Amino acid sequence: MSDTHAQSVAFVRDTMLPEQPPPASEAGVIKWMRENLFKGWFNSILTIVSVYFIFKIVTGAFPWFANGIWTTNSLAECREILDGATGACFSVLTERWNQLLFGFTYPPEAYWRPTLAFFMLIVAIAPVLYPKAPRQLLIFTGIYPFLAYWLIWGGTLLAPLMVLVGLIAGYFAFKQFERQSFAMGMLAGIVAAIVVIWAGGVIPASMPDVLALQAIQSRDLGGFMLNMILGTVCVSLSLPLGIMLALGRQSSMPIIKWICVIFIEFIRGVPLITLLFVANVVLAYFFPPGSNIDLVLRVIIMITMFSAAYIAEVIRGGLAALPRGQYEAADSLGLDYAQSMRLIILPQALKISIPGIVNVAVGLFKDTTLVSVISMFDLVGMIRGPILASTEWNGVYWELWGFAVFLFFIVCFSISKYSQWLERQLATDHR
Amino acid sequence: MSTISDPPSGSFQLSMLINDTRYRSYTFQFIALILLILAFAYLGYNLLANLQAAGLNISYKFLGEPAGYDINQTLIPYTSQSTHWQASLVGVLNTLLVAFLGCIMATIIGVVVGVLRLSNNWLVRQLMSIYVEIFRNVPVLIWILIIMAVFIAVLPQPRDFRGDDAEASMVLGMFAFTGRGFYLPAPVFGAGSGVVVAVFLASIAGIFAFRNYAKKALYERGQLIPTFWPSLAIFFIPSIIAYFILGRPISLEYPELKGFNFQGGIFMRNSLIALWFALSIYTAAFIAENVRAGILAVSKGQTEAAASLGLRPGRIMNLVVLPQALRVIIPPLISQYLNLTKNSSLAIAVGYMDLTGTLGGITLNQTGRAIEAIFLLMLFYLAISLGISAIMNVYNNAVKLKER
Amino acid sequence: MKKIAILGAMTVAGLSAGVASAATLDDVKARGKLNCGVTTGLVGFAAPNANGEWEGFDVGVCRAVAAAVLGDPAAVEFVPTTGKTRFTALASGEIDLLARNTTWTFSRDVDLGFEFVGVNYYDGQGFMVPKELGVSSAKELDGATVCIQTGTTTELNLADFFRANNISYEPVPIETNAEAQPLYLEGACDVYTTDASGLAATRAAFENPGDHVVLPEIISKEPLGPLVRHGDNQWGDIARWTLNALIAAEELGVTSANVAELAAAAGSNPEINRLLGTEGTLGAMLGLDADWAVKAIAAGGNYGELFEKNIGENTPIGLARGLNAQWTEGGLLYSPPFR
């Protein structure tokens, strides 16, 4: 049958032609470039400008990095070696890394202590950040603050241990009295904790050398370590404070509500730097005469208040986002205020607020650099003060500031990436 | 019947203060109030005791005394003989100046970057997200200091302009970019310049009137009047004609190198520029994210619906997408402005004499009146914040979706 | 320990609140340490060395007071203060003594409620310019950009000087010495002005000190001295007479080398005997041990020794005695008699 047309048609194809590749402009790299880089004249211009920009940066920065010098003792030596060529003088980082990271008065033989505390922080924070981490680690998280205090400030381990014992005693007292009412439990817990800490204070005072590390003054803390300490301590302290403020602001009791509103709006209305000025020059007037509360502690108090106000607003957003039905359901179960908050409302509201809280934490961590303005030697303070003013390193701007940018970027960027990841994990609304 | 659920009036017991929900809130509030008063009394008592021990008192008289120091950038007349109060005012104006300039520039950069992050150009998208991530994740203080340091180290100083074979020269003979700041030509208003300015202002009013007319024509008669070229013409032509008719009353004064510095023209100090620029690019990274989120928040259906009505892309953007996106963008935008204003207090790091530099800096140092000066400082920032918040609330109410 | 101490301070503050800071001496003795306010770092006057130990001329005063009161020159806690924080730190009791080249002025003494216990360095405000500018007098500085360290009397003197000479300038306020250095070296200011001693110290830290000159004009009187809070006269006396003891020791030829020998037994000079406590009860009048001045002098030497060791002509700072010589040698140092 196939040859029916053999006479009438000159040629009949009986095999398939091999598949042709698509036209060059519609495939692979070229298609991608056409669609993503050169779609229309405007995009083409943008692309060319961007390529030129990247080219300039790369050609400018590459020799600078490649010729970098890591081993000299001063900028003058660097310049001598470079002999007019472009190149970075990274030796300032190798020579002053300890000052940049730990400040210039922290005893070098104790550098292992904050370093260890830092790595333990990663372990301690894991169960909080990753719901899949083993739950037993939470115990370590609970112990960590006391351990870190001991490692960084030194002194006898008994002192933080006593506080820990006091808090545990408070917790048991709370559990004991909680059945009567939440307020009673709270009161009993606080009283028990204070009594135990008060009474137990004798033990570390009488045995200052048991399990003691060399004690280190707060004012000897410095460098990036100070930023990390301020950031971590203030964020963790401001969380409970922020929750209380948020609940207070939502409260139906006018006086409590207004106290919280005024506090939050006041703190959010002023720049952090003025609060640091308060810590620096005013706060001392409000403590009892003769009490000597050091600057780091005063700064921690003010930064904690600052971040608590912001966290309170984030949590308030979380509380407001919960459907009213949740509140009503809790009421209809006969739960009292404390129970409904603890069991129903807060777990949900906090879950919604976590990304916001992480954003506040990143912002706060960045803001810890402001302490350099009140003459504390954090990373920025070290660079601006002792290092750039020293005879050897006068004029090494790019390398030092680049290092500071690098450190902060690594930390903040990874936290904000974590926050985005968490947001996706928590998205339960399946949009 | 109702008397049954009401408690008998005589049987009030003390324990009801704790156990009865009707009274319990009063108890708690009472306790809170007492604690608050106690806390304040305690702090106040300490304050008084400390002040007494140090032989000090709280007094604002220092505001009326001569300041005794000079300020480099003054927007109002000020000499070293002016009072501390006037020095504070100079500081307030400098704060407002840098905040105002910063907000404008941050908005421009932020909107451009935000839109470009949604561009279909892959390279530009990546570049913009790198920009946003780098600037968002590094403290603004570091940016301010970097820009200031680079400014001083990279740009030539006035001394480099000196001599016959100077290392640096002025751009177009008008602009001098030095490490101390930018020197720009300043307009000098001669006789008759008032008329030119008036004509210029009138033509701006004219543009608005014309645009209104064009809009009306479009809505009422369906008549499409082109607006762009006529607006441009109204903007330039009358002013230029008036300028030449009156014999060029406005001239430019060029900066000149005299003695240690350039003299004449407008001088923008390095501290102002560094602060302005750093605050702008830092805040712009946040604004870009807001803009992007705002545009993404307008659902695709809106664009498609507008397109199916036959609107052109430009009009879709102007009439459909932007009005909806702005509702999402503006509240966070305003809070970014607020942040920028508060961050401008970091001026002290580069020696820009804003309020923190005058009242919270030199005045505080000279008079030693720490409590008073810092209280006033906080009050000022608080007033600005509350003011802007109030405006934001009014705006939010105005654009709120009217749900029926 | 600290946490407990703070908690304690918070809770029983009501108890301690009544006890005002009247008895600084008792506080210091109970604490076992003297809290002394110094600068954040000015080479020669007060700066931490490579080992993080503070040294300098002002530091020497702190150590002498600590030695006189506690018997141990190392029993000092140095608190770095800025121009902004120093007065609050002293007024609030954070420090017991402020030895931070602070100018003695009327308003600080009277209005701020402090007590200057004497002068340990007679200074004056000067100007430093790069040699290449070819400036030889401060009056030629019309239109110059001037870097000023704020928080001192410097900006007031400067405003007065330029107003009196009817010339203009552009002030650039800088918070600390360290921040001013790069600004000046990069040429963002033509002139750097602060106390002449500070200029010398700053110039010494430059890579090429020879490229910069300090102009001859000294435009102000800056008597720098340690100060304490008003109202605790006993403590003020201790600080005052410790400083005087250092000055008198130089005048009387008592040095750290021979002080132990001279104090071993009463010698022929009754003034030395009274100063060193081998005769009379001056120490007891101050509420201190009889050999308080011996300890103070042994701590770092007499005034002259402190000067030579920290800022004298053989140090990088290279300051001449000038006004700070003994009155017997044409200077202004003049200790009241010890009797």
Image (cartoon, rainbow, N blue to C red):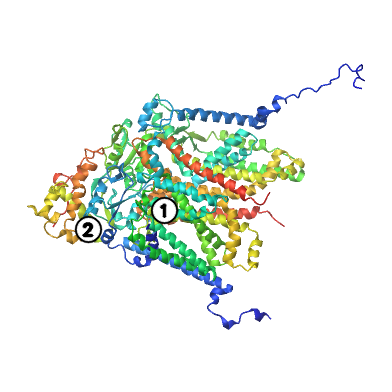
Q: Is residue A425 left or right of residue C102?
A: right
Numbered mark located on residue B32 in the image:
none
Residue C203, percent across and down? Answer: 30, 37
Q: Within 10 angstroms of label 2, few (less than 14), some, or many (20 or more) residues?
A: some
Q: Residue at x 81, y 21 (%)?
A: A15
Mark whose residue sits in front, 1 or 2:
1
Q: Is residue B342 visible?
A: no
Q: Is residue A43 left or right of residue C76?
A: right
Q: Within 10 angstroms of label 1, few (less than 14), some, or many (20 or more) residues?
A: some
Q: Quadrant of residue A397?
A: top left
In the picture of the structure, the residue carrying the numbered disc 1 is A149
Question: Which of the two residues, B391 or B190, is positioned nearer the viewer here?
Answer: B391
Question: Which of the two residues, B174 or B347, is positioned nearer the viewer here?
Answer: B347
Same subunit, tags 1 and 2: no
Rounded to the nearest whole Å, what is the CA distance between mark 1 and mark 2? 41 Å
Question: Which of the two residues, B235 or A113, is positioned nearer the viewer here?
Answer: A113
Residue B8, percent across and down? Answer: 60, 82
C39 versus A336 height, above or below: above
Q: Is residue B129 visible?
A: yes
The amino acid beneath tag 2 is: Asp
Numbered mark located on residue C237 in the image:
2
The amino acid beneath tag 1 is: Tyr
Q: Quadrant of residue A398?
A: top left
Q: Residue at x 58, y 59 (%)?
A: A346
